[in-house]
Structures are given as structure tokens and as C-alpha cells.
Amino acid sequence: MEKKTSKQIPLTELLDLYNSVGWYAYTTEPETLKRAIEQSLVVHTLWDHKKLIALIRAVGDGETILYIQDLLVHPEYQRRGYGKTLLETVVADYPHVRQKVLLTDDSTKTQTFYNATGFEEVGTQQMRAFYREY
């Protein structure tokens, strides 16, 4: 595996990875996905030779808030620690940022994963999270 930090990722590789995990809302507008990647605060990827197998990207100001927008691992490579490695990498990039936030689906699999990496559900704290989709 080769780890890279770059926002310049071939669009075909991005589309293959996002499609592999069923994130079709991203892939129906490829140019929007490309711009989103390019405008991210940081993007880390893992490659198996020339195949993109995992990606994490964060958005935010890099000083007071870090929002982990996407964390994807190709299904053929899941449960090997790649997601955890990428998550730890992006968190380590910004140790001074107090708020590290993410929004994900409500499955047992994702809850178990994020709890194991030190993330807590908002409901366990004295705070609320709000969401609005257009």
C-alpha cells in the first residue's frame, strides 16, 4: 500500500471508489465531486499499485474545526485497518483543533468503527447536532 496526500486524483479512480461503496449521490455529478476533492482542507489516499482503495477528506478552517467529510474504503480492502489508519492520519494532522466532527449513517458497523477510534456520539455530550439537506 502506498499512502499519498494530494487533491489531484484521477477522476476515474474517484468514481470507481465512490461507486464501490454505493455513494452514487457523489458520482452522478463527477465534476462536482472533483471540485469538492480539490477544495477540501486535506485529502489522504491509499493505493494498491495504481488502484485507489481508500480515501479520507476533511473540510474546515484547520484552526477551530475539522469536519471529516468522507472516509471510504473499497469493499475488497475493508476490515484491514486502512480506514483507521487514514482517520488517525487526518486527526494527527490537526492536533491543535479542538472540534473534530463527522456525520455518518446510523448502522451498527459505523458506530462500532467510530467508537473504536475514539469518536463519541453527540448525544453522549451536553450538545446537539442539527442537519438540513436540500
Image (tube, helix red, strand yellow):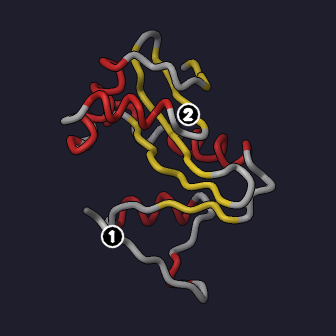
Q: Position of residue 50 (x, y in %)?
A: 43, 10
Which image quadrant: the C terminus? bottom left
**Residue at the spot x=58%, y=46% of the render?**
87
Q: Residue furthest top?
A: 50
**Residue at the spot x=35%, y=66% of the render?**
108
Q: Position of residue 56 (x, y in %)?
A: 51, 39
**Residue at the spot x=52%, y=78% of the render?**
122
Q: Secondary structure at mark 1?
A: loop
Which image quadrant for residue 58?
top right
Which image quadrant: the N terminus? top right
- 87 over 82 or under it: above or below: below
Q: Which mark is residue 43?
A: 2
Which image quadrant for residue 110?
bottom left
Q: Which mark is residue 132?
A: 1
The amino acid marked with disc number 1 is: Arg
For this rendering, which residue is in front, 131 or 49?
131
The crowd level at tag 1 (other Cα within 10 Å; few <14, some 14-19, many 20+) is few
Q: Which mark is residue 61?
A: none
